[in-house]
Image (cartoon, rainbow, N blue to C red):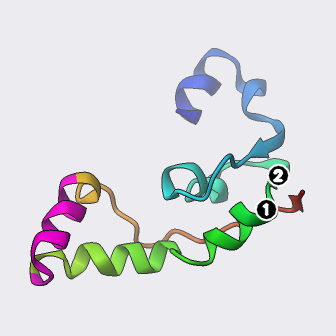
Amino acid sequence: MLNAISAVDPNAVNFKYLVNTHANGDHTYGNQIVTAENIVASAVCSDEMDELPPQMMAGLIDQADQIGPVGAYMTSFFGRFDFTGIVQKKPTMTF
């Protein structure tokens, strides 16, 4: 997404604020690649980010074939994503 935006306007990816609306990984795991002056989220969102860090998600996917129906469910939704190497970047501002 960032590459597509910067192809149109290189300055468009210079964000002052990045807002995490909730703690799902598809909303927060990309924080590390966005250069924003401030990452903003509710305190609840920030706390929830600690409950399922990227390393835990990577581990769940790695073990999916060993945990039965839950593993199959996880793989069906998240198996195509690589969660290894993601560094959790927490909000700098909470409310």
Magenta stretch: includes residue 72: yes
Viewport quadrant of the C terminus: bottom right
Q: Say which residue label 1 marks.
A: 91
Q: Say what amino acid the circle numbered 1 marks.
A: Pro
Is residue 90 visible from the viewing direction of this image?
A: no
Q: Image check: 78 left or right of 70? A: right
Which is nearer the eye, 47 or 32?
47
> Which residues are the magenta region?
66-76
Q: Secondary structure at mark 1?
A: loop
Q: Image check: 42 left or right of 78? A: right
Residue at 76%, 49% (x, y): give it: 35
Marks 2 and 1: CB-CB under 8 Å? yes
- Residue 82: x %, y % from top left: 34, 62
- Residue 67: x %, y % from top left: 15, 82
Q: Say what amino acid the circle numbered 2 marks.
A: Val
Mark earlier in primary sequence (2, 1): 2
Reply above or below: 30 against 51.
above
Q: Image check: 92 left or right of 2? A: right
Q: Say which residue label 2 marks.
A: 40
Could you give the CA–CA distance between mark 2 and mark 1, rounded to whole angstroms?
5 Å
Residue at 32%, 56% (x, y): give it: 81
Reply above or below: 34 against 5.
below
Is residue 49 visible from the viewing direction of this image?
A: yes
Disc 2 packing (10 Å; few <14; some 14–19; many ≥20): many
Which is nearer the eye, 25 or 37?
25
- Residue 80: x %, y % from top left: 24, 54
Residue at 51%, 74% (x, y): give it: 52
What secondary structure prevails in the magenta region?
helix
Magenta stretch: includes residue 38: no
